[in-house]
Amino acid sequence: MESNTSTLVVPTPSTEVSSFDFKSLNNVPKQFVWSSKDLIKGSSEKLNTPLIDLKAIKGDEIAMANAAKLVREACMKHGFFEVTKHGVDHDLIIAAHREYDSIFKLPLEKKLSAKNKHNRWGYSSAHAERYSSSLPWKETFTFLYHYIHESDSEIVDLFKSFLGDEFEQAGLVNQRYCEAMKEVSMNILELLGISLGADHSYFQRFFEDGEAIMRCNHYPSCKNPNLTLGVGPHCDPTSLTILHQEQVSGLEVYVDGKWLPVPPRHDIPDALIINIGDTFKALTNGVYKSVLHRVVVNEKVNRKSLTFFLNPRADKTVIPPKNLFENEEQRDYLDFTWTQLYEFTQKRHRADPDTLSSFVLWLGTQEPPPSN
Ligand SMILES: C=C1C[C@]23C[C@H]1CC[C@H]2[C@]1(C)CCC[C@@](C)(C(=O)O)[C@H]1[C@@H]3C(=O)O
Ligand SMILES: O=C(O)CCC(=O)C(=O)O
Ligand SMILES: [Fe+2]
């Protein structure tokens, strides 16, 4: 997949390099150099994100209402807030990072073999199998987690098939981590429903049969960090992102013309960062923002983040709760499904600042599906 045009993209030409061994790189190859516009220096001012204590608001109507007010304010401005006392065990978070440390330490050849034939799940080195310029300075491990799943060993089986039986424990830890993320997401969806004046359970019901893209991002330290980015400027096309970052800065959000860091909370290392994505923006009929963010890298230390990208069931139509629009004329977006938007980002348009607007334009040119 190459540039962001609405023409069907062709796979990266075989002459291009399709992987990089970061620990052997003593400079920044040209494929990783981003435009000066994308590399504008971040501000020393930090993003002001409300921190919500999910345990304190559970079952307490007044505390829930106050938290909903803080969340509404943040989501109407930049779409980012943080949660603590979320119920995800500290040892599970530590174990997840430890398992990924062992995966990313593997020889590159072994890591590259850990992917399925569609190139979508498993390991990726800088997405070099998909793009040949503006490559992100990161390697990733990604898989799909179904909220409703027949087998409890789905994730374990994936890790064993991709990496071998010795990674059964990594699969178990990730299975438990995704189950914990699902619980957290249900509590956050209730809070978001209340913050939007919708039925408390609207979003919980909308996502109860959803799916999540679980990804660990590993951003190696970089000899010349001012030339490249761990992740380029983008809005998440997904619905809700639940992110745990190590105690290393890197995430920045674009607000009021400035790149504002969202640094790790050294006093609350288990804090989870929540951000609204494009699909949830459409689910709120544009009331909440899906905001541009990026990741900068540094010369000294590696950084990892665990990102859990929640999506509705792939074929479910994205429709806001009734209280957010009075008639069809007040709808900001055409009906669409997550499958349509996801495929758009994978086959036609590399997720960037303009994904949703480009998608809506493209959708308008497509034949409506036959009404069954
Ligand atoms: C649906 C998705 C596509 C990406 C992973 C999830 C949500 C975030 C998207 C992404 C991280 C946005 C920046 C560009 C991207 C290509 C990346 O750097 O990984 C995007 C992901 C992807 O297409 O794999
Ligand atoms: O690693 C981070 O802090 C953010 C990553 C991100 O924005 C993404 O993967 O979409
Ligand atoms: Fe993101």
Image (cartoon, helix red, strand yellow):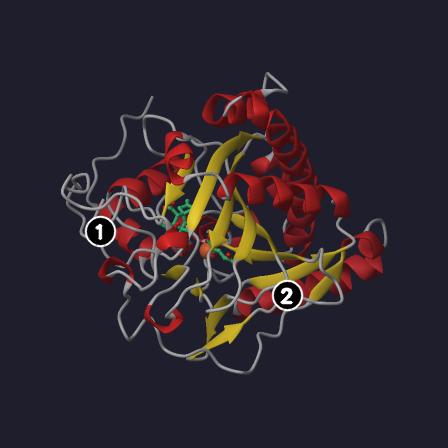
Does the image show residue 285? no
The front one of 324 and 353 is 353
Q: Real-space Cα distance between discs 1 and 2?
A: 31 Å
The front one of 320 and 37 is 37
**Element type where label 1 sits in the image:** loop
**As drawn, is 304 to the left or to the right of 117?**
right
Q: Quadrant of residue 110?
A: top left
From the image, tell me which residue sits under label 1.
Answer: 132
| Image: 38 above or below 211 | below
The front one of 159 and 180 is 159
Residue at 57%, 63% (x, y): give it.
80
**Image location (x, y in percent) of residue 339:** 38, 35
| Image: 95 above or below 158 | below
**Element type where label 2 sits in the image:** loop
The front one of 86 and 121 is 121
Does the image show residue 106? yes
Residue at 64%, 50% (x, y): give it.
193
| Image: 212 above or below 5 | above
Q: Which comes before the other along the chain, label 1 or label 2?
A: 1
**Quadrant where the N terminus lies?**
top left
**Image location (x, y in percent) of residue 23:** 41, 53
From the image, tell me which residue sits under label 2.
Answer: 264
**As drawn, is 194 to the left or to the right of 256?**
right
| Image: 273 above or below 317 | below
Task: Identify the residue at the far bottom of this view.
Answer: 44
Q: Quadrant of residue 354?
A: bottom left
**Quadrant where the C terminus lies?**
top left
Q: Amino acid at mark 1?
A: Ser
**Image location (x, y in percent) of residue 208:** 61, 33
**Image location (x, y in percent) of residue 367:** 21, 35
Asked if the beta carbon under badge 2 is closer than 8 A to the nearest atom of ligand 2, the reply is: no
